[in-house]
Image (tube, rainbow, N blue to C red):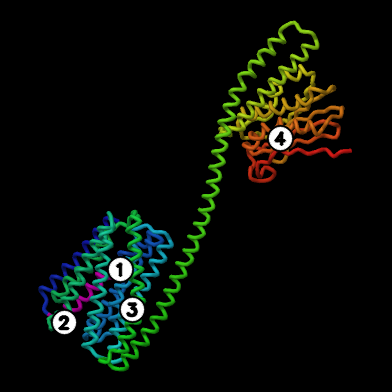
Amino acid sequence: MATRAKLWSIGIVGCLAALIVAALVLPQSFRLTAFSDIIQCVLLLSGTICFVPHALRSDGRMRLFWVMMALGIAFWFVYQLFWTYFEVFLRSDVPDPFGGDIVLFLHIVPLMAALALRPHVPRDEYAARISRLDFALLIVWWVYLYVLIVMPWQYAVTDQPTYSRNLNAVYLAEKLVFLAALAVCWAGGKGTWRVFYANLFGASLLYSASSYVANWAIVRNFYYSGSLYDIPLAASMAWITLIGLWTQAANPQTESRSASSSYGVWVARASMIAAFSLPLFAVWAISDISVPERIRSVRLTLTLLTALIMGGMVFIRQRILDSELVRLLKHSQESFDNLKVLQSQIVHSEKLASIGQLVGGAAHELNNPITAMLGYSDLLLSTQLGPEQHVLATRIGQHVRRTKSLVASLLSFAKQAPTSKTLVDLNALVGTAVKLSQPQYQALKIEVHMELEDDLPKVSGDSNQLLQMCLQVLTSALHQMSQRAGRTLIVSTHRHVDAAVFQVSEDSPVATDKAAEQRSDVLGLSACQGIVQEHRGRILCEPREDGGMVVRIELPAAHSNPGSGTMSSPAPLRVKSQPSA
């Protein structure tokens, strides 16, 4: 691309140099006029084409920017074609007034629209829509101004001096506003964009100055096509091509929020001023008695039509603002509701933290005497005791161990500390828990049967917590069975849908006080509830018809979605009562 750009640039500079030589050497003639007009057409066509690759390589707001730039230069090129058609092909002067003058006036309008896009500044879609609508209002106003002031003297009542004077005044005002907008973009741009706006400002200033000087020469009959007055004009055309060739489209650079907001405010103010100026123009059109009645009628009709168009655009703008306001109000309400929920969660967390500190201190104080009692009970069992005394000492040790396990479980539940989870084999944990409980159930003469499913899915969790849960369930079941004879504890695992199930059931032929045992079971199993909830599982505790008890813990499989099926939310401990006979 660099080589092609260099060759293209050399060609453009060569065309400009040839035009300068022709202006200096050739006298006023048709040959000079034709050569000058054709060179200017080539320069403007080149300026239009050089912006097209930028549009093809970009998208969104950036693409629209380059399209508007190319469209503005294309209007300028079309106007030059009109001029060339009259002077070269028809060999006549351009008529005055000329209907194609509106094309020359309109060529700055797309350039203004391109500046309105401000591609060097990142903006959200809402701000971009409002800004585009504001500039659309301004563009409609500029077109209205041209039709109001210039065109009636061309079509309603033909008056060449007034037409030319009004055209030059409106066109000069448009160029000054465009130059001011370029200066603002130049001041706010950074890096490549700053260089781009600086060059565009220089080319536009050169064009504005040269066109003003050319108009001065035309009034005094000094100007002819191909004269030295055309050299600055052609130089500005060549400059446009060089800008398009050597500018690299850069990513938008961050602008401060205050600067962006200030820009948007001033654009909105300008668009509203343009809309509210229409009644003043209507009053001026009615009260200006120095112009013919036909022109006053045309101006009034045009003002009313423009007011209708701009009023519709203002209505659309207001609808966009209203919808955005409603969205912001809804967002504020949602944020307020979320803040209230967060506040309640923080209060709840603080309460839990206080409870955790209290339970931690109490557990520390309780562990010391429990450890002492456990040591003394073991020491007592090692002495010479009678059969009845040995049974009592064994029961003391069992209850002390159970109390120690409950204190540890209560402390773990109160902390609710997040733990790292890994894939855990539930069968291995159950087997380990049964082995650790072996001294307890052997001393109680309780038979334990394990029924573990081979292809049990793994669960995601903390192995220490889950092992503690299995031990607590087994300890609670052994405690309930300690007073009954002919006792069998069945420990099993199996798969249920997308869950791994750990189940403990006692099988006893002796009828018991089921209500009391259920209350005791719930008190024992509630210590496991925090661990089960943290693993997105649930606990079910229900009596059997033969007098036994079933404790069922379901944990979601590692590959399943915890948010679906039976694992949709952490379920509380549920106890089903056996119907009375």
Distance between the alpha carbons at the discs numbered 1 and 2: 28 Å
Q: Amino acid at mark 2?
A: Ile
Left-right relation of 162 to 480: left
- In percent of width and height, residue 44 lies at 26, 70
Identify residue for label 1.
Answer: 48
Identify residue for label 3.
Answer: 277
For the magenta stretch, what is the residue range? 28-48
User: Is 66 included in the stretch rendered in magenta?
Assistant: no
User: Is 44 included in the stretch rendered in magenta?
Assistant: yes
Indicate the quadrant where residue 152 lies.
bottom left
Circles 3, 2 touching at the beta carbon (< 8 Å): no
Identify residue for label 4.
Answer: 553
Q: Earlier in the sequence, mark 4 or mark 3?
A: 3
Left-right relation of 349 to 580: left
Quadrant where the image shows the N terminus? bottom left
- In percent of width and height, residue 149 lies at 28, 84
